[in-house]
Each structure stands twice: as C-alpha cells, then as structure tokens.
Image (tube, coloured by chain):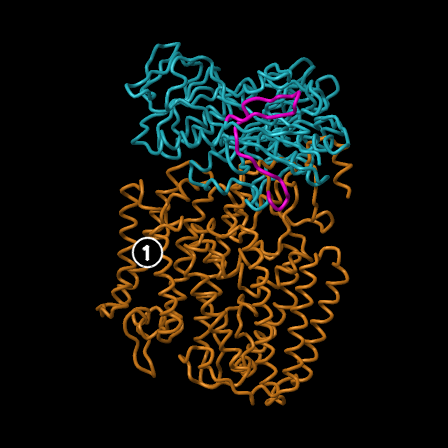
Chain colours: A orange, B cyan
Amino acid sequence: MSLATPDALNITTKQKIALAAGLVGLFILLLAVFNVDFPNRPVFLAISLGLVIGGTIIYSREAYLTKLEGIKNDGTWFKSISSRGVLGWALGIFLTTFYIVLYFFPKYLGLGVDGAANTGLVALFDPLSNLLSGNNASQWFVYGTLYTVAILAFGYKFMLKYRHNRYQQLRTASVMFFQTAFAFVIPELMARLNSDDFSLPYNDLKNMWPLNYYAFDQWRVDQFINAQTVGLFFLILGVVMIFVISPFLTYKYGKRWYCSWVCGCGGLAETAGDAFRHLSDKGTKAWKLERWMINSVLVFSVVTTVAVISTYLGYDSEKYWFTKSVFLISIGVFLTVLLAGILYFKREELNKSAFKGAIGFYILTIAFLVFFSFFDLSQIKINASYFSFGLNQNSYNFDSALRSFYGFGIGSIFSGVIGTGFYPILGNRTWCRMGCPMATIMGIQQRLFSRFRITTNGGQCISCGNCSNSCEMGIDVRAYAQKGENIVRSSCVGCGVCSAVCPRGVLKLENDSMDGRINPTEVLLGNDVDLMDLLNKN
Amino acid sequence: MEHVVIIGNGISGVTVARHIRKNSNKKITIVSAETDYFFSRTALMYIYMGHMKFEHTQPYENSFWKKNNIELKKGFVKSIETASKTLQFEEGDSLQYDTLVIATGSKPNKFGWPGQDLEGAQGLYSKQDLDSIERNAPDNKTCKRAVIVGGGLIGIELAEMLNSRSIPVTFLVRENSFWNGVLPEGESAMINRHIKNHHIDLRLGFNLKEIKSDENGKVKSVVITETGEEIDCNVVGLTAGVSPNIDFIKSSTIEINRGVLVNRHLETNIPDVYAIGDCAEQRDSGIGERRPIEAVWYTGRMMGETLAQTICGNRREYKPGHWFNSAKFLDIEYQTYGWVYAKPRENEAHFHWKHEDDTKCITVCYDTTNNTFLGINTFGIRMRHEIFDRWLTEKRDVDYVMKNLPQANFDPEFYKHFEKDILAAYTNQLQTA
C-alpha cells in the first residue's frame, strides 16, 4: 500500500524505513497467499496490518508535516508511480490481477471450497472475522478489511496533505467513518444477530440501488421480508433512500453528499486513489464516451433490475404486494411522467443531443418493459457459452442471464477490475465517471434540480489549468472558469480539489439559489460595463 | 474577405481572435514564433514543479483552431511594411494583411549587467525560458545554487519553482522589503517572513553588480554591489520586471515609445493597425489610475474583448472597469480590488489587519474626507470579485464594507472566518484614533 505514496526519489531515511515497514506488512500477506501457515494468526495479521498502517502514517507525516501548509503537488508528473511510468504500470497490473483472482478465483486466496476450512490469506483473516461476526472469513471479508485499511491509512495521508483545508479534512473524515462503520463494522456485527429462524442479508445501509445492483434480488428481498419488523424496516429504508432521501440531499448539496462524502467507491478513490486523480482524460472525446457509457449502464441496470423483479413477481406474486403487471405498469408510468416533466420544465436547459439521448434511452427502456410484460422470462433460456467464449456452459433463464451478465460485466469487471485496478493508468474515478448508474441518476438531478454549483470568481481566472488537471472526473474546469461561467456539470462529485489548487482563488463549491446558477458570459467581469451589458444579455 | 493577422498567440491575441470569430467570418491568422498553440504563460511555473505537463497549460484542444477556422502560423516577424500591408518573416516568407493586431507581449528587463547574456542567466517569461531553466537547473546536483535578481511577482515564482527541486535560492531584492513599491508595509513584511520560512535566502536592499562566467560561457557566480560578496551559482534569474517586446517594429512607420503607442481605441498611428496587451502603451496617459503600459493577464484579455468589437465594425473605446489583480506568494494567495497604494496618498488612510498565524492579512484603503471605500488587498482570504466590483461602483463607505465583509468571503466551505476579528480591530482602531 505504501507503493502508492510518492516515489522513492529524494525521500528521507525515516521515509525509507516507513516504506520498508509497509512493504514488509504487505509481504506477510503475500506469504499467506502462498500458503505459509503462520503459527499465531491473530498476531501476524495484526503485525501485517499494523505495519502497513503505521508505515503509511510515518511516511505521510514525514512528507507533509516537515513542510509549511499549502498545495503539495510537487513532482506529481515526474514520479513514475503517478505519471504512468514503470511503477504505475506495475501497480496497475498487480491490482488488476488481484481483482481477477478475488472475483473469479477466490480459492487461490485460500477460500475453503465446499465447506473445507480456509487456508492461506483468507485463513489469516479468520480470527478477525470471528471476532466481529462470529464466522470464518470469506474472500469478501479479506477484501473489505484491506479496503477499509486503505481508506483509513491513505485518508490520514490525505488529511495531512490538505491540513490547511477544512473542507478536505471533514470530507475525508466522513468517508473514513462511513467506510469503517457502515460498510465494515456494522454489517459484520449485524451478522451476529442471525440465528436459525432469523437472518438478515449483509447490509451496508449507505449502499443504495442501483450502485448496489443486487438490492432487489429475490433472495435478498425474501430475507428482509422474513426478518420481521427489522427486515421490513431495512427494505423500506432502501426504497426511501432512493426516492426521497437521496433526491432531497442531492437537491440541497449536489451529488457530493454521496460521491465524495459517503460512498465507499468514492472513499477509496479520494484516499488511496488521490495520487492518480490527474490521470483522468480531459478531452472532449472522453467526455463524449462518458455520456454514452454511463447512460447506457444506467439503462442496463434499470432493465436488469426490472427483469429480475418482474420475473419473481410473475411466478410468486401472492408473496409480495405487487403483481408483475402492476409493477411493470407503475415503472412505465413513473419513467414516462419523469421524462415528460424534465422535457417540459427543463426544455431550455437541454441541448439537442441531451434531448435525443433521453428520448432514445427512454424508448429502449419502455421496449424492454413491454417485452417483459408479454413474455415469461423464466421460460426463455440463454446458453451462457455464447457470451463467455465457452467458459461458462450453464443455461440461464433470461432474467438471471441479464442479472449474471450485469453482475459480471458491470459489478466485477467494470467497477472492480477496470475501475480500481486501472487507477494508476486511467485515474481514480473511471468507474464513477464512466460506469456508476447511481452517479448517473444523481448527476442528472445535479445538473437540473440542485442548488449546488462551483462558482467562478468574476474575471480572476488566469487559465493556468491546475483545476482541470486535478479533476478526477475529467471535467475541463478551466473551460468554464476562464469564461467566468459557473461549473454545473452532472459528473462533478464535489471533491473540491479544483478549488483547493486554484492559485488565484477563483473557484468555490457552494449551495445557493437555482436562479443565475448557470451563467454563460461573453465578456468577463472587470471590463467595460457597457460592453458587458451589450454582450452578456443575449 | 478581410484578412485579420494577429502577431502573438498569448492571452491578448487569442482573445481578440476568438471574439472576432464569434462576431464575423473574417479570415484570421495568428502568428507566433514561440509555440504552435496558445498556452497559459502564468502556468509555466507549474510545469517545472511537476504539477502539470506543458500540454495541460494549453486552454484549448489542438483541434479547436481548425474547428473555429483560425489559422496558426509559426514564424518570427522581422518587419512590418505598413504601406503594402505586408509582414516579412525571419524565415524569408511574407504575409499580407488587411487588419493587423500587434499583441507581442513583453520581454524580461535586462539593465546592462555584465554577464547578463551568459548561458544560465535568464528571465522567466517564455516557453524558451522554461526550456532553458529545465536545461540549467534540472536538479540540485547540476544547479547547486540559483540567484534571483529582482523582487516582484516573477521573482518569487521562480524562487518557488527552484525550491520545489531543493535547489538553494538566494533572492536579491533592491528594495528594503519585498515588492514594497506596490504592497503596504505590513503585507510586504509578512511576505518577507513567509519567504524566509521557506528557507529562501532573502537579501533585502541588495543589487547585482555582475555575473561571472566559467570557462564554457556559463554562469559561475554573481557579485553583489553593496558588499562585493561573490556568490557561487549556476543559474541567475533576471526578474526585474518586463518591458514591451517590440524590437521588430522599430524599423516600421508605427509609432512607438516604450510600447506601441495607441489611443483609447487601441489604434496606432497607422490605420488598420492595432496593439493590445503588454506591448501596448496608452498614448496620452494611463486610463484613470492605471499605468500607460499594463503588463497584466486580465488587461490583455479585456483589450482583446474590446478590440474584437472595433474590428467587427462596432468601434469601441477601451474602458476597463475597476482595477483588480491577483497573485500567489508561495503558499499565500493575494487578491486586490480597487486601489491600495503602498503608502496612503493624500486624503487616504489604510486599515490593516493581520492574523496571528502570519499568513493572512488585509489592507483596506479609504478616503478620509468622505470615508469612501477605495480598495482592498487580501492575503490568505479569498474574496468575491463581483461584490467588491459592485461596492466600488456604488461608492460604498468603508464602514459599510467592513460590516458586510462576510458577504464578500469566497473561502471554501467550513473555513474559519475572520470577519468578526477584522471588524473588532477596525472598530477598535476608530475609537483609539
């Protein structure tokens, strides 16, 4: 993990020792992968994680506390690890490989198959897992622990880096808290409540649909319904989060309330991924790709979820409140009303391509809904070998085929292997920018119905490009700032780093009234007032 | 079709080109000998510091120019023949124009110091200057020490750059406090301390006598006038201001003084020839309290915005609004709105407040006869351009400004606010005064 801290160029002795400590900590984990059987697992696990965390802490303190407060980006584009050099590629390949093994070959990490005891790395984490949930570890527990450790250690580093900036500090403290408590400790502890006649699914409360694409899978919904009041509470809370809490918070604060303050994916990107934020592509081609990609994933996720739900409603309807047709019709009506409302009330803010895209994606979605209502998806069989080069020879019902393909393509490959594995190559927010369906929904809302914007300070921009360079979402912030125009972009996660690095104090994230939020100007503040009047009116 | 040729692809030249394109379909050619594409000069320092690469300092994608039908020509203009409306290039070719805009910017001042043209002695203005410093000071083994001569905005940026590569810096400043020709005493003194806190060897009240050469024609050392001390160094930064880059115009009929002389409409003495940005000099006097030559990013941009109107048939005077500017001194950001002189002028007074951490302060200037607010310098606290611009237009009195200061705050969310402290100090000062 210490690999992602700055290069071993010009580092102090203390930093070298810290780096070594961190690497030894990682090496212990590596030995465990290769099935070295440590005599006292709790001790070795503690030593390993302790060295990684301690190493990062000491390294960061030496890096930042020895200097005056301020922007600390010296050498970012020179260091091999953060400029797609050899170290960057090596780390990228290592992470990618790790994700492939984690998702598809967990037995190599030592996961016991068919009731066998864990070995290797997974077994090393058994004691910690037992302590929390009372069960042995899985590969997901190992991953969750390492993920949390990374957010905590690098979160600390990030807070030191921005110790002059309270927005950054609070934001980082927030993602560290939500990861540790909501994604890690609470779900593990809740698993202790489970008994023979009571069981709750692993439930990270903040992990909403559609980011959590399995939120409404039948097994999960059933578990919630069977778990009496508590279960129902969580199920209803999940729905309320999607339709009430999230829209409300996004209206008030923009999607940053989630993406850069709460979300786990965002949490890792903002902490461990911070060293790679400048690697995102700012070109217009990348932006175009982004718009196609992220909206397609949203449609895919909606269609998949509807297919899954409508199928089990179809053959099991007396168990639930809805029948299949009521469900499909209400989804159809909801989407139609939503789209019609946007097209009518926001018609002046939509350009041609947004208009076309919205209509196109809407027709596609409705076509699927119609298709689902006329066919019983559980009777349509899909042979997976056509889609997996023969690797997977199972035959699936249509709904579970969609669901599996989504889980594989989007859930595993996109968000994990590419999204995180490629941090050192594509930047730290590839998933959030190109793939996350949750980000798409909040993004549409942020663009059209939110008080959030990045205000540009009059005519003070000098077009230096620090803001664009540091934007992890690949927004060309400067393109707006140099026109004196506020930044109101659906993809902005509100990390606030553009504002922090601006050498002229031009950018401020804020929530204010919707009037004048989008303010294209031709002549900037500071020039002849008559000229501004003349040209800025049209 | 009318052919508009613009010499110089800096902020002034590019702004005028963009705005002409918005308002017309005239043929536009931008000529530059410096770089293929427009880049932000103010960002050169960040390339050396590794915050960005050169391409990141280019505000428009390379495809932008073709898309907007703006032609780019790389070439060095040797002379302008105004009678035949022809540019002659160093490279031997020539170019006809119907309308000419001179936007060639500045060049670093050199005051005839012995050794000022040695390899390793340089200013920091152009892309070529950046290449040169990268060549002569890639690290602290090649460049064991650098000496910077001239305490202004570019000097302190150069010091920050070299500092980022752990190259020891000696900073010779002629004045007895940093930039005190512009900054009031309290602010200037705070920046002095900040420079020293960054382990930069700041020498106030010292002048450069000469630069000595080694056997290869490279900088070896400098000698200080006052003490005769010789300081070994490998790079000398000459940052004692800039002046208009107009040598190539001297042979033409275009009237020049220190810069290209223009009237309020940015017109030179020759019809269809205009000058904007750093290289333009107001013929009669500066506009308002502005200097006749304004070598500032923002004014270059504003002249470009204005001139585009004139060239497109809507003849307009250059009438800049309230003065504003900004800079960054190492870790301390600086903004200014309205006029705050180093020393209060007649019927003026300053209110100065400084935070105990020695990185934040403000100075407010007002008219003592009627209490009108005249301007503010702010260090380490970001303030809103729009609010101050409005208050200056409305000629608010200083009490109003001090009481409403929270409205002007532009710091990021959750930052600690100091307006109460400032107001308390202000009120207190009034009572004791």
Neighbour tally class for label 1: few under 14, some 14-19, many 20 plus, Cα within 10 Å: many
Residue at left 54%, top 29%? Answer: B93
A314 in relation to A302, above or below: below
Q: Quadrant of residue B286?
A: top right
SS for dot 1: helix
Q: Which residue is mark 1?
A: A52
Q: Is residue B86 magenta?
A: yes
Q: Quadrant of the N terminus of chain A?
A: bottom left
The segment highlighted magenta reads B65-90
Q: Total label count?
A: 1
Q: Nearer the viewer, residue A276 or A193?
A: A276
Residue A226 placement, left or right of A68? right
Q: Quadrant of the C terminus of chain A?
A: top right
Residue A243 in view of the camera = yes
Residue A487 in the image: x percent, y percent? 63, 48
Q: Quadrant of residue A348?
A: bottom right
Residue B183 in view of the camera = no
Residue B428 in the image: x percent, y percent? 63, 25
Give amino acid for label 1: Val
